[in-house]
Amino acid sequence: MDQFMKRAVDLAVNNVREGGQPFGAVLVKNNQVVAEGVNELHQAYDVSGHAELLAIRRAQEELKTHDLSGFTMYASGEPCPMCLTAMYFAGIEDVYYAASVDKAVEAGLGKSKQVYDDLQKQKEERSLVMKHVPLEEGQEDPMKLWKEQ
Ligand SMILES: [Zn+2]
């Protein structure tokens, strides 16, 4: 196993020992660790406190950029849809993971699988109900405002 993946797994192991969930992540560029994260849901009331998201947040703050293209994510567990989406937005194109989503389900951590499954469905069939509310006549349109800038 590669040194970065080993580090991600070590972070996850330590996190479990400290009362957290088994997730660690390491963000690498040019063969160097730029940021790390562990799942911090046991420490803060913040559902976005996932290992990968925290590593992304730290790297972006440190480098003062949203663009992490060319970075590689090493995650002890297969990223959830939220973290995966953050990686898309950040321009990350390479992700290595150890434990699969199915492995997480076996460990009693089924949320990720549940969301991945839900996203496979048509919008109308998902468990999270989304309703389209168009702007009212005469209401200022922020999209239009943005486009005209
Ligand atoms: Zn996540």
Image: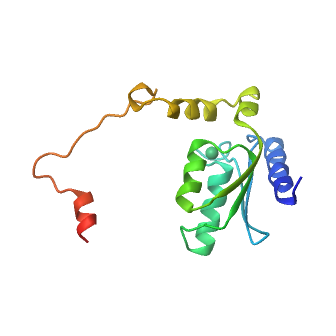
Q: Position of residue 48 (x, y in %)?
A: 57, 48
Q: Position of residue 81 (x, y in %)?
A: 58, 43
Can you say whether 94 is above or below 59 in the image?
A: above
Q: Is residue 92 visible?
A: yes
Q: Position of residue 142 (x, y in %)?
A: 25, 58
Ligand 1, seen in the image, is in the quarter at top right
Q: Which residue occupies 68% across, 42% down?
A: 42
Give the quarter of the figure containing the C terminus.
Answer: bottom left
For the rendered model, the colour scheme is: rainbow
Q: Which residue occupies 62% across, 60% down?
A: 92
Left or right of residue 84: residue 16: right
Quadrant in the rendering for residue 136 = top left
Left or right of residue 108: residue 54: left
The number of callouts visible is 0
- Residue closest to the far left: 138
Q: Which residue occupies 72% across, 31% down?
A: 102
